[in-house]
Image (cartoon, rainbow, N blue to C red):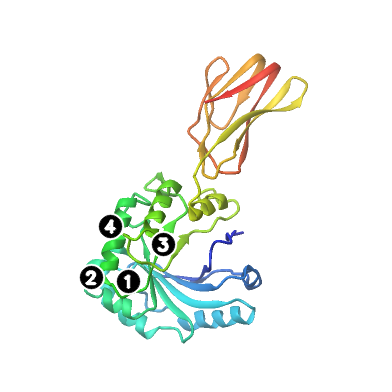
Amino acid sequence: GAAAPSELGGLRVLTVDVDAAGPGWAEVDAATLAAAGRPVTAVVRIAGARLPAEVPMADVLARVAAWRAAGVEVVGVEIDHDCASAALPDYAAWLARHRPPAPLRFSITALPAWADSAALRAVAAAVDELVVQVHAVRAPALFEPRAARAGLARFAAAVPAAALRVALPTYDAVVAGTLERSRPTEVAAFLRWLERGDAPPIRGVVWFRLPVAGDDRAWAVATLRAVIAGAPLRGTVIAELVATGPAQADVRLRNTGNIPAAWPALTLGGAVRGADLIGGYVSADGHRFVAPGRELAPGATAVVGWATGEDLTLDAR
């Protein structure tokens, strides 16, 4: 399941995904959500660049009421819709008609490209808060720090009175067949910029998405915590021989840092009788093995092979 670091002051939880085929309701365990003890914003995700004919807002509010009855502190509703700039006037009118009743806060995700639309102020006036998405806005790149800064600055200047948050990525994605990464060092530098006085004023950051067990495309909890705290970011892979019997050992890698780190090239020494490495390692010269171009998550371990012999040593570079 999702692991929400204590540094996060609230959770945004997908409630329904609406596309041309209709609504698809997310399976959410209200008891688990209540036990998390965080304020919750119910998210309505709407696919496509234009609003579909039917968005079940009444049903969303019914689900909010059910969550509250189960002990969940629901504080708002958020619309996640990548609206086409040409359709923003209609979107502003739709938002005004579908505002949830007080005291629920009403927020939307917003795209930097909307800054060029004269309708943006009407959109901003219809909601309490806008979450400016500065990632996954220009294919194939997932996150470009310079473009993100410029886009946020332009957006903030277009609606100077609006309450803003910024959505930042904590995941990797395959775009046009290529793995695009959100690099913790780049995101951390952007976050430090937000904290300085020369950045547009914002209320906070929305992280997309939370670490989930088994999701190797999302950051580890340790990485997210380190980025939020401004801690040094280091990935350190230690290679070691772990004895499994007389004159035999497993070859194991451990990342003791807080960000992913590359698997190193490995060289076995001593009186090696036999060895075999997996995971993409290639023997280059005797018992020297070329790194496979993979990364190890922080806190993770990987057994990448075995060796037999006397007085075995292992060198990593």
User: Mark 4 or 3, which is nearer the eye?
Assistant: 4
Mark positioned earlier in the residue sequence (1 or 4): 1
Q: Element at badge 1?
A: loop
Disc nearest the viewer among 3 and 2: 3
Badge 2: how crowded within 10 Å, few (<14), some, or many (20+)?
A: some
Q: Please report the residue visible at 72 percent of the width from the left and 22 percent of the height from the top.
A: 248
Residue closer to the observer: 225 or 181: 225
Q: What separation in Å lies between label 1 and label 4 (alpha carbons)?
A: 26 Å
Pick whichever, 273 or 16, lies toward us.
Answer: 273
The residue wearing badge 1 is 50
- Which tag, 1 or 3, sits closer to the chain's start? 1
**Residue designated by label 2:** 117
Which is more N-terminal, label 3 or label 4? 4
Image depth: mark 2 or mark 4 in front: 4
Up-down relation of residue 19 to residue 208 (above or below): below
Residue 163 is labelled as none
Label 1 to label 3, Cα distance in Å? 21 Å
Q: Nearer the viewer, mark 1 or mark 4?
A: 4
Amino acid, disc 4: Ala
Count of labels in the image = 4
Element on which disc 2 rests? loop
Residue shown at 57% from the left, 55% from the top: 212
Q: Name the kind of residue labelled 2 in the image.
A: Ser
The residue where tag 3 is placed is: 167
Rendered position, 104 above or below 137 = below
Please state if 29 lies on the left or on the right of 283 as rendered. Answer: right
Residue 37 shown left or right of residue 126 in the figure: right
For marks 1 and 3, give the one nearer the viewer.
3
Q: Amino acid at mark 1?
A: Arg
Q: Residue at x 54, y 83 (%)?
A: 62
